[in-house]
Image: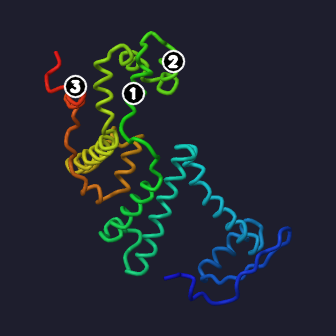
Amino acid sequence: MSRTAGRRGRKPAVASQGKRASLGLKVTPTIKNRLDAEARANGRTQSQEAEARLERSFEKQDILPDALKLSYGDKTSALIRLLLEAISNIVNTVGWFTFCDRQNWVNEPFIFRQVLIASFLIMKSMKPPGDPSFPEERVRALTKNTKDLRLLETIANFYPNQREMIEVVLKSPVILDDLIASYEDIGKTTAMSLLNSLHEMNKLNNQQGSLPSEVAEGNWLASVWSDLGPIADRIPAMPPRKQGRVIAKPRRSRRRDNGSEKS
């Protein structure tokens, strides 16, 4: 059902550029009194104060896209904003119609499920064509010549803190095998690692009554845990991640040309 279907009054006229336009609106007595007080304090008329505050509200609205772009780049920030808009639309529409607390939608099973469905469909619609498996051939081709330091310099420019690990990987086929195997489930292991960290924070808080300062200070994930509040209680302990050759063995078995074991 459209929210604007029952709106009354004249259709808003488009303002002409270069001319001041009138804006008619009604506000509560509290808002009017605060606006008048701020206008006097700033040496403005009521109209000038209202316009200044409206301009600032639009500027603040643009802060989020700019901050996301600076932190994550254009493509990731655009996807985050799309997901946020989908969540907002679902929560506002369903919350309004079902009399749910829209600020507390994560505790509403129906709304949560609809958000999950929308998020999955958005991500699925943008799935790139091609084989989704790990690009093993590309990695092996690039690391085949371990004497070629140009590759090391290229990778090290992107990951300066991991130069030693990169050098070892380039010179050790066995480690490379295990590293490739470990990356096959990077999506799952990344989620499990974050969730397990949140679970551990929750356990520490329950044991000690608060999160230790050495864990909380300067930790962005601790702020996420704090904002989640009681929702963090739902996060179970994640199973331990398999490592190294334990993961790599199945990969090697798939490469066999026949049923015999390789020497």
What is the secondary structure assignment of the residue under circle 2? helix
Q: Any mark on residue 137, and which? A: 1
Decide: few, some or many residues near mark 3? Use Cα within 10 Å; few <14, some 14-19, many ≥20: few
Query: Earlier along the polypeptide chain: callout 3 or callout 1?
Result: 1
Q: Residue at x 47, y 26 (%)?
A: 159
Position of the C terminus, as image quadrant, is: top left
What's under tag 2, amino acid-wise?
A: Glu
- Residue 153 got which mark? 2
In space, the residues marked 2 and 3 are separated at their CA atoms by: 36 Å
Label 3's element?
A: loop
Badge nearest the viewer, 3 or 1: 3
Q: Amino acid at mark 1?
A: Glu
Residue 11 in the figure: left or right of residue 173: right
Q: Residues within 10 Å of mark 1 (few under 14, many from 20)?
A: few
Please name the amino acid that badge 3 sits on: Asp
Position of residue 101 relative to residue 137, above or below, is below
- Pointer 3 residue: 257
